[in-house]
Amino acid sequence: MKRVTLALTLALAAGLSAQAADAQTLKTVKDRGMLSCGVSQGLPGFSSPDDKGNWTGIDVDVCRAIAGAIFNDPTKIKFVPLSAKDRFTALQSGEIDVLSRNTTWTISRDTSLGANFTGVTYYDGQGFMVKKSLKVNSALELNSASVCVQTGTTTEQNLADYFKANNMKYEVIAFATNDETVKAYEAGRCDVFTTDQSGLYANRLKLANPNDHMVLPEIISKEPLGPMVRHGDDQWFDIVKWTLFAMVTAEELGVTSKNVDEKAKLENPELKRVLGSDGNFGEQLGLTKDWVVRIVKTVGNYGEVFDRNVGAGSPLAINRGLNNLWNKGGLQYAPPIR
Amino acid sequence: MSTEARKPPPQIALKIRRILGGKAGWNGVAVQFAFAAILGWIGYEIVSNARANLENQHIAAGFGFLRNNAGFDVNQTLISYTGSDTFLRVFVVGLLNTLVVSVVGIVFATVIGFIVALCRLSPNWLLSRVGEIYVEVIRNLPVLFQILFWYLAVLAALPNPRQSISLLGIAFLSNRGLVVPSPIGQSGLEPFLAMLALGVVASLALRFHARRALFQEGRMIRIWPYVLGLLLGLPLATVLVFGLPFTFELPQLRGFNFAGGSRIIPEFVALTVALSTYTAAFIAEIVRAGILSVHKGQMEAGSSLGLSRGATLRLIVVPQAMRVIVPPLTNQYLNLTKNSSLAVAIGYPDLVSVFAGTSLSQTGQAIEIIAMTMGIYLLISLLTSAVMSVYGWRVSRSLGA
């Protein structure tokens, strides 16, 4: 009996891996009636559940926008919280349709994981947080410090590079999840907490006395964060990529969740193209003509999403900086919808 | 007419039939071969399917990544390691960290387990209640919870390095761990170690001689003064001739942390304490069961010979109990080794943390890394069982069972 069970299990495992290679993600999502979205286990501003279990954050809104474009219903999502080290396996195995989990775009991840980055939702860089009582003003004064870091991140490698390049010694303590890392930092196991700078501001809010801690000015790396999809399904890649572009384009054209209906009635040729009364770009993507309207109604444009989750309208109060539109001094730039 | 004896029928075919077919005869053999073929086919399908899918999705495969640079650091390494070493070296570093925590844990768990078992069996009411409470509390709490308790309790109770607790000015205790002076070899080290080894060998030879005299001629030889002289006197003599074998490098507070000296990190302490106390609760019950399995008459016989309770236990009861104790004890050793993978929760860099964790997500090669990790755990467990089986066999043999 035991042997039969074993054989069945193995056969099942083989079947599952066959399904992962299936390239019809949009159809799978529609049949399931639900988008499966990989997010973090709790990073305020990016993806974290509130006390009622509702997920909020900039990464969450990217998924809501995709669900909105497909189903016209932002609630048809299953959020799958993933640790940094489990996230790629979950995407490869087909457990999630899109990974939207503050993931840094690097060449090795783009080429060896069987997955593609679709764009950049947030331009970030790695920084350091220390207790004010240590009286440290620069990352270059951190020689011999103990550093807490979350395992399985680019952060860990940047850290090794930075200390080596500056000829400084350090001790690294790597934890599996963000919360464990923060807890160990707060307990005094290490002098320094390092992650992407947005993450530092977000985690500082979790500490008992946020004002006793400061983020050092140095940024030691480029961390473009963006969503990922599996290789081999170009249609799905296009949908996720253009959902983000649609949000940026909407901000550029001044289309917001509040005025989208009025804007759609205007006789402006570009607005008509983008909002679907002219041309059939949405249908070419496999969506509907009014896909941009659906997205904007669901989550708002990129600027609204930024302000609500990490910007001026949130406790994090992070400046737009690099994440401003290209014509306002930032890097957010969408190819034209035409 | 030849008168040669008739050849016996070929034995090999019969043997195969008996082993594979059992009572079912040749039909049974056929079924076994068919079953093996199906298993082999399923295995082949799984491997080729996985390989094809990986290729289709352009996911890197193969073990070539082991030669790539890891690019991250580890905070406890028993062999030298830097970020520019390879993933293969990360694997060895993680494996050694797992082994050291398992071996230290097993030693402590065994010692604590035996002590608690003897407490529970003690005629002293208070001692036996204390043993009972220990067992009931510790074995009924989840081990992950205990690891976190020790880690957070140890960390919360200790000061930061600048206010560290000084032990005689040479060792320092803080929430970064225990820093102790580290020995640095000098010119006198080699003769010192050579004489120490000679002393150990000579002492063992003396013990062998004394036991032979005791068992074969019934003579008691007092050897401990000679052993003491060999173990202490010989090395001391080399110190007088060649000078000190090593000097100590004292830890000093520099910047954020101590520089110099060796350090025991709090993650290691928390993990070892939690695993050994937890497993000790189970070992205590196993040892108690083993001792109770020895007939009461043995204990009484010991007392009637005038042996103390301790001597009776040591010489008569425990050797007989070992036969019952060893097999389940092996299970506990295996459990402890496998539970050490919970280290990932408190940031201790064991195999699962640095290899199946960090390395996996840096390379994305889940299948290869998980297979290697599973393989090595299997190997460790099988080796542990093998060693314990040999020990169990020796115990049984020495009892003439």
Image (spheres, grey):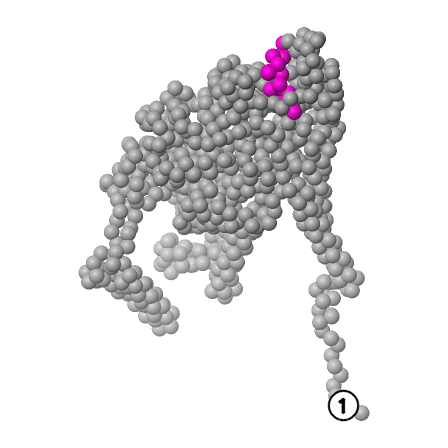
The overriding secondary structure of the stretch rendered in magenta is helix
- The residue where tag 1 is placed is B3
Q: Is A252 covered by the magenta stretch?
A: yes
Q: Identify which residue is drawn at 62% across, 16% down.
A: A250
Question: Measured from the top left, where is residue B123 in percent x and y?
Answer: 40, 46
Q: Residue lying farthest bottom?
A: B1
Q: Which of A259 and B304 is in front in this view?
A: A259
Counting labels gives: 1
Callout 1 amino acid:
Thr
Residue B229, image x, y percentages: 24, 63
Q: Is residue A31 magenta?
A: no
Q: Nearer the viewer, residue A15 or A25?
A: A25
| Subunit of label 1 | B
Does residue B15 appear to the left or right of B70 in the view shown? right
Horizontal relation, residue A137 to residue A151: left or right: left
Q: What stretch is highlighted in magenta?
A: A242-258
For residue B362, say whether it is visible.
yes
Going 67% across and 49% down the picture, which residue do you hit? B47
Above or below, B93 against A126 in this view is below
Lateral position of residue A134 relative to residue B369, left or right: left
Q: Examine the rendering and report whether any part of residue B345 can be seen.
A: no
Determine the residue positioned at 75% across, 23% down: A283
Against A74, is B283 above or below? below
Q: Is mark 1 on a helix, strand or loop?
A: loop
Q: From the viewer's perspective, is residue B271 above or below residue B211?
A: above
Q: Where is residue A216 in the image (x, y as percent from the top left)?
A: 39, 26
User: Which of the 4 quarters of the picture holds residue A201?
Assistant: top left
Would you call the spot at circle 1 few (<14 residues within 10 Å), some (14-19), or many (20 or more)? few
A265 with respect to A185 (left or right):
right
- Up the image or down, A298 lies above or below B256; here it is above
The C terminus of chain A - image quarter:
top right
Of residue A322 and residue B386, the one placed in the foreground of this image is A322
